[in-house]
Amino acid sequence: MVALLKMPAHLPEESWADRRMFPRKEFHATVQGHRMDHTIEARQMPRLSLMLRDLSLGGLSAISDRPLSRGEHLSVSFPQEGMLRGWDAFGRVIRCDPSGMGYRVAVEFDPLPAA
């Protein structure tokens, strides 16, 4: 067993990126989202367009033209590109912050597909 004789002067703070399970890939595309909750806002405007910023197996970051509620459930449709088939993902909004281009949205994908 090893003991520290002298504590380091500065311990680095763990950033959000260091805690990620899956690496992010910068990805620029426009995808379609569908709000799945039964709130008034979601029922009035169920469809939205998301401009992707980055993507990973665990979620995505995108710009939305309208605000979304934290915890709101979404389905996201990724269109076919070349030889790659299109696919759908389900997730929930982790955060939504205003930005100069709209709203920066972070979505965490559900670990299991919806039945």
Image (cartoon, helix red, strand yellow):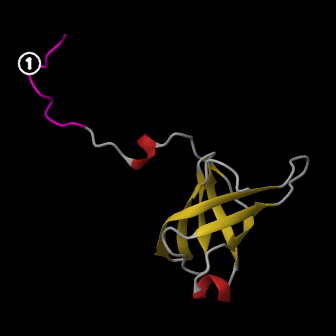
Which amino acid type is shown beneath numbered disc 1? Leu
16 relative position to 63: left or right: left
Which residue is depicted at the point 58% across and 46% down? 24
Q: Position of residue 89 (x, y in %)?
A: 71, 57
34 relative position to 15: left or right: right
Which residue in the structure is indicated by mark 1? 5
Closer to the camera in the image, 41 or 27: 41
Q: Which residues are magenta?
A: 1-11
Which residue is depicted at the point 67% across and 59% down? 90
Disc 1 secondary structure class: loop
10 relative position to 77: left or right: left
Q: Position of residue 75 (x, y in %)?
A: 69, 65
- 44 above or below 7? below
Q: Main secondary structure of the magenta part?
A: loop
Is 88 included in the stretch rendered in magenta? Answer: no
Quadrant of the image containing the C terminus: bottom right
Q: Position of residue 69 (x, y in %)?
A: 51, 75
